[in-house]
Image (cartoon, helix red, strand yellow):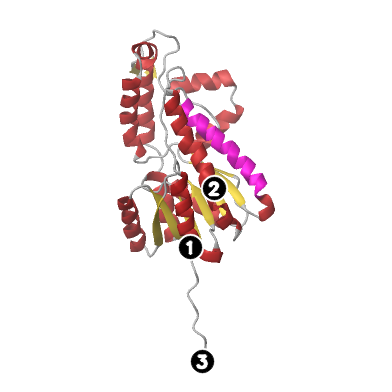
Amino acid sequence: MKPTLKPARRPAAVVTGTSSGIGRACALRLAGEGYHVFAGVRRRQHGQALVQEASRNGGQLTPVILDVTDEASIRTAAAEVADSVGDAGVAVLVNNAGIGMTWPVEAVPLADLRHIYEVNVFGQVAVTQAFLPLIRACAGRVVNVGSIGDRLSLPFGAPLVSSKWAFASITESLRMELRPWGIHVVLIEPATIQTDAVKKVKEDAERVMSKMTPADLELYGETYQAMTRKAIERASSGSDPDVVARAVLHAARKKRPRTRYVVGKDGRLLAFLAGWAPDRLFDAMRVRLFGLPKKFGAAAQPVNGVAR
């Protein structure tokens, strides 16, 4: 009599920030491709919606309450995953959770800037530290979802973009540090992606404007509004989030993944220009792209998408 074989355990994947957008796409893509996904969410109702969608496609997904700015939440999530996977470890950690807000550097409240770094930098490091023992157990992967902004900056984009530069630098160091254990560390660099976050751009911009002082508004109000209009226009025609999810899957599965994946609308063009265009020429192109005036006092209302 032949022994009964136990069904093979699915490799475990941990994905942060899965409530919507890129994180949601990554969680569902990995679940559909045979991973047991532990989906980090901040609200249980978001997790249940993910479970239902993943199960319709035969995927296995377990929601985990995970706030990347809360060390206790991170420790609890890591312990829950460890209890579930046992000695099998975690095959891939996808650090996706992140926030963004635009501000003129001169006007940004330092508390707001610190909060962005808490989520986009310190939170990513804290999650990675917590899960590395599980990743090391099976020589798994760390896949960090950054931004094409880690190669170039944008007007009013310093709070977000600078945090992405920091995250990219940490990713590069981590890649070399974990090499002795056969752990690949990969950076995904999305460009223009159409997500639910696009709907928040206008709301966030209005909130920023409401927090600016009268002096800040006089200096930056019109140009900030012009930039916001153009940013919404571009983001609304961006690539589907699944292009990021497919890159994450490739990075998770390939024996020798790339160190960086540039994905999304205009990504390769922007990466090329960032590396080869002279600074002043590239500055002029970015100012024109976002419809900003060349001199203070110039009308900021765009004409055919370009400031006069």
In the rendered image, the vertical position of residue 195 relative to residue 139, given as above or below? above
Tag of residue 1: 3
Under circle 2, the secondary element is helix
Give coordinates of residue 45: x percent, y percent: 30, 52
Tell us which disc is closer to us: 3 or 1.
1
In the rendered image, the vertical position of residue 152 relative to residue 43, given as above or below? above
**Chain-order first, disc 2 or disc 3:** 3
Residue at the disc numbered 1: 83
Residue interval drawn in magenta: 158-178
Give coordinates of residue 86: x percent, y percent: 52, 65
- Badge 3 amino acid: Met
Tag of residue 128: 2
Q: What's the CA distance linking mark 1 and mark 2?
A: 18 Å
* Disc 1 packing (10 Å; few <14; some 14–19; many ≥20): few
> Based on the displayed image, in which of its 4 quarters is residue 276 positioned?
top right
Under circle 3, the secondary element is loop
Tell us which disc is closer to us: 1 or 2.
1
The residue at 50%/72% (across/down) is 8
Extreme residue in the right direction:
180
